[in-house]
Image (cartoon, rainbow, N blue to C red):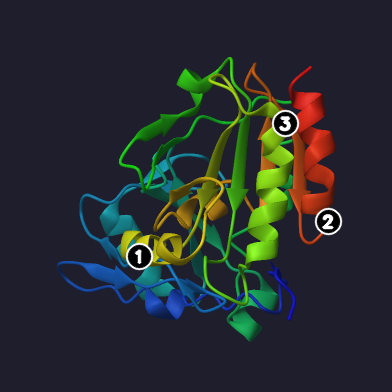
Amino acid sequence: MRSFFLLTFAGILTLFSCQSLTAQTTQTVVRQEIVAIPMERRVINESTKFIDKRTGNPISYQAYLELMRTDRQGYFLESIIDEYGKVSSYSIRPTTTEERETRRFMPFDPALRPKVGEPMPEFVMQGFDDKSYRLSTLKGRVVVLSFWAGLKPPTWNVKQAAAFADALQPYQSEMGPVALGVVRDSKEEVAAAMASQPIPFVAIPSAYNFSQKFHVTMWPSMFVINKAGNVVAYLAGREAFEQLPKALEAANR
């Protein structure tokens, strides 16, 4: 079975639809799910920040409720995710005709993915090792930021782990590459996976929001970031393991 998943438009079943945005007097609970990978539950209330995507202007909670009362199917909330992988606010935009008909939405936009040759946006990730990894403090070291559907078969196997470790091995030193792996698995699930096989990166548990923040649409995917903090390569799918050694060589120049 293939070890990667491609998130196609048809496959993205976002239950973050306007019909789920039921306006209640005190709060609104929204659940988002993409290809059976659940996002954390959102509680929308008076303290939630909204932005009009067309104008960039803030929208009040009362104005949001009025939009829902006027046309509940007419608007879509896009999560704005901060450097910690948390939803800081929501951008509101009108739904398209196709979205109204299919009730399917695309929260990912590959055009907004960090680009090769440009600085990688700041992130702060909490590792399984209980250490905090902030990109700006990692300058001077190569960073391999990878994204995985999970650490259990069929999306993960020993062959993948070995290929990843082999690519990193020539550069191992005190100031060698920092390898981080964003996974949807909980800390307990990561611990169970590590008990049965080596994991060649620091796992970042329950961190699926970073996939949306960086518009990652395929697993596995990898950003290779050089010592200056710039993206050297974006690798995705089965070919990522074959391309990783060359990307690491370029990053270490």
Of tags 1 and 2, which is closer to the observer? 2
Q: Is residue 102 left or right of residue 211?
A: right
Q: Are marks 3 and 2 in contact (CB under 8 Å)?
A: no
Mark 1 = which residue? Answer: 40
Mark 1 is on which residue type? Glu
On-image quarter of the N terminus? bottom right
Q: Are marks 3 and 1 in contact (CB under 8 Å)?
A: no
Question: Residue 218: in sight, yes or no?
Answer: no
Q: Could you tell me which residue is drawn at 63 percent across and 68 percent down?
A: 157
| Precedes in sequence: disc 3 or disc 1 | 1
Q: CA distance from mark 3 to mark 2?
A: 20 Å
Of tags 3 and 2, which is closer to the observer? 3
Q: Is residue 104 left or right of residue 21?
A: right
On-image quarter of the C terminus? top right
Mark 3 is on which residue type? Pro
Question: Residue 148: in sight, yes or no?
Answer: yes
In the image, is residue 121 above or below residue 165?
A: above
Which numbered disc covers residue 170? 3
SS label for mark 2: loop
SS label for mark 3: helix
